[in-house]
Image (spheres, rainbow, N blue to C red):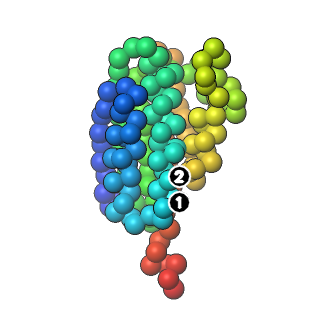
Amino acid sequence: MKTINSMKITIPAMSKNEALARSCIAAFAAQADPTVEELTDIRSAVCEAVTNSIVHGYRDKAGDITITLKMTDDNCLYIKISDRGCGIANVKQAMTPLFTTAPDEERAGLGFAVMEAFTDSLKVTSRLGKGTTVIMKKRLTDKFESEQ
């Protein structure tokens, strides 16, 4: 697979920037002419990842979120979302549906489950005090292939 386009943006970790992140990624993905369902899946997964960085990674502190996008010649979109927040002590446990580090808040603990449901693959790495990186892959329908 060969990278045919890429983009990298850094945004402040603020709730009002969730929509900006979704829109930037949707605009980038548009080059592959995704279906409405694929675009909705991408936007949902990105929203969860960015929200996790804001709510759990930085909590009430300032910080940045870096989003790196890559489109490959096999029509795959790779989305990497990184923060330099507090990190996750136990990634496997954090990925368990309904687990949350904020039980006193209105958090359902479904962020990683949503990301997994809407993408083809999900990889999460984290180091305490250093931050968390989420890498998602979404294979988009190749409209040329589907017409044959």
Question: Relative to residue 86, is residue 7 depicted above or below?
Answer: below
Picture quarter containing residue 15? top left
Local SS, label 2: helix
Q: Residue at x 46, y 75 (%)?
A: 143
Picture quarter containing residue 103? top right
Dot 2 corresponds to which residue?
Answer: 41
Question: Relative to residue 71, is residue 43 depicted above or below?
Answer: above
Q: Amino acid at mark 2?
A: Asp
Q: Nearer the viewer, residue 94 or 35?
A: 35
Horizontal relation, residue 109 to residue 69: left or right? right
Local SS, label 1: helix
Percent coordinates x, y for residue 131 in the rendering? 45, 23
- Please tell me how crowded label 1 is: few (under 14), some (14-19), or many (20+) other residues with Cα within 10 Å: few
Q: Amino acid at mark 1?
A: Glu
Percent coordinates x, y for residue 42 in the rendering? 48, 50
Q: Residue at x 44, y 78 (%)?
A: 144
Q: Which mark is residue 37?
A: 1
Camera sees residue 109:
yes
